[in-house]
Amino acid sequence: MLTETLLTIINRNADGIVVIDEDGVIRFVNLAAAALFDKPPMALVGEFVAFPLGTGETVEIDLPRPDGNTIAVEIRVVEIDWIDGRAYLASLRDITERRQAQADIALRNRLIEASGSGIFITGVRGEARPIIYANPAMATITAYTEAELLAQDCRFLWHCNPDDAQNQALDQALIDGAPCTAVIECERADGAMYWAEVRLTPIRDAGSRQLTHFIGVLHDITDRMYLEAERIERERISVALEKERELRVLKDRFLTMMSHELRTPLSLIRLAHDMLRQYGDKATEEERLQYLDSIRTQTEHLTDILSDVMTVSRGDSAEAEFMPEIIDLITYCRDIVEQFQINYFKTHKVEFECDRAVMRAPIDRKLLRQALTNLLSNAIKYSPEGSTVRFTLTSNGHNGNQAIITIQDRGIGITEEDMARLFEPFHRGRNVETVPGTGLGLAIARQAVRAHSGTIAVDSAIGQGTTFTLTLPMVEVRARG
């Protein structure tokens, strides 16, 4: 019989132990073996064995259990002396998890071997990073054989261009033991160049945290790079063609505007000239002065048109000519509005509103006057007689540092189609009909506002009117204490 101490030792053994006599009958089962069979020890004693017995060999079997499942068991059998003769001692070990791990490793290996991406593993030998494994895709991508890849420092893959910043980043990552992803140009064994995305991942010992390996993944992205280059080139050509089209449209609009806007004043000048030439000696002094005034008025109109064209053509150079001075913005705006009130009192009502006592701002008098004059002129020009144009001046808060100017009319409004191109030079709304204009006023206004580091916005509804809102930086005014 087994001594109590020996029985305790055997029962505490993690491996299952089964003693089988020469007739194949189980004579002893420890607790670990009973757990493998999922039966009580006494239920197993006396049963015939259901697994092979080959002494001195290690075999693996699938052991069925009462619940219908099976577990993988490794069995090693040795011959021993037993109480009443010879017997066999079978050592059983549950290897289900080990077998699953082996299966997982085998699956990963097959996936790595079958991967279309190049995968390589490097060792760490001082400063060297030799390739110790490369999957078949690495050989396909680089045109090197597996034997040519193995034992070479992985840096040879991208050192055809050692001065490239991306290549240097990979080199530094190998020194620092840090992860890195880079897009680099490489050279195949046959001399052909290709683009690759390389991702390096350091592997460290779980205990010491010492760097032991690098896993590298190399993707051939040559086709993708070529497609991206083609896409960029197509976009560049598309942008160039669009700019050319815009210039062509701008030129057509300019020629249309000039031919239309210049025809009327030139015709009036010619008419006045012809009348003076043919009938000047017969005309009264008053009539001659009217003809001369007409020539002067139309000449000034032509000068204004050319001035507007020159202003728009200078474009961003307006900022270089920007000459601001700190002024009282309230007085400045009120003077402009009063001039319109005098000139248009018979046709329109122009109102001025301001809810601030002091507003000082760095203003270029000439530029801002041009912007406000254009906006007020448009508001009157596109509004019916007898309507009101409202000019409002305020700030964005009691101590606000921005002046807010709004010019509101009750005119024809702006269509949604015209909104996107509202500030383009020579562009005129589709609903202006026969109202004269060059299409330069809003473009000039926007240039002037931008020169002041401000913004201009518009809100409009067909048949209800339009509101332009200008936002300009102000000088902080401190209260006296």
Image: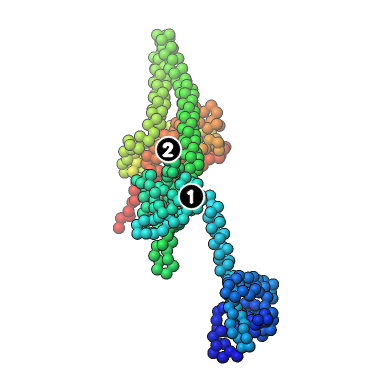
The reply to whether residue 406 is in sight is no
Q: Residue at x 57, y 69 (%)?
A: 97
Left or right: residue 12 versus residue 175 is right
Amino acid type indicated by mark 2: Arg
Q: Residue at x 40, y 55 (%)?
A: 130
The reply to whether residue 450 is in sight is yes
Most foreground residue, 227 or 387: 227
Q: Is residue 337 above or below residue 133?
A: above
Question: In what element is the residue under mark 2?
Answer: helix
Q: Which quarter of the picture shows residue 28?
A: bottom right
Is tag 2's residue or tag 1's residue first in the polypeptide sequence? 1
Most foreground residue, 198 or 443: 198
Position in image of residue 412 (x %, y %): 55, 35
Most foreground residue, 87 or 44: 87
Question: In what element is the residue under mark 1?
Answer: helix
Q: CA distance from mark 2 to mark 1?
A: 59 Å
Left or right: residue 435 versus residue 315 is right
Q: Is residue 27 above or below residue 450?
A: below
Q: Nearer the viewer, mark 2 or mark 1?
A: 1
Quarter that holds the C terminus: bottom left
Quarter that holds the N terminus: bottom right
What mark, if any, has residue 208 been given in the picture? none
Position in image of residue 159 (x %, y %): 38, 47
Amino acid type indicated by mark 1: Met
Q: Which residue is mark 2?
A: 446
What mark, if any, has residue 138 been given in the picture? 1
Position in image of residue 136 (x %, y %): 51, 51
Q: Is residue 466 above or below residue 25?
A: above
Q: Is residue 138 above or below residue 290?
A: below
Mark 2 surroundings within 10 Å by alpha-carbon count, few (fewer than 14), some (14 through 19), many (20 or more): many
Q: Residue at x 37, y 59 (%)?
A: 125
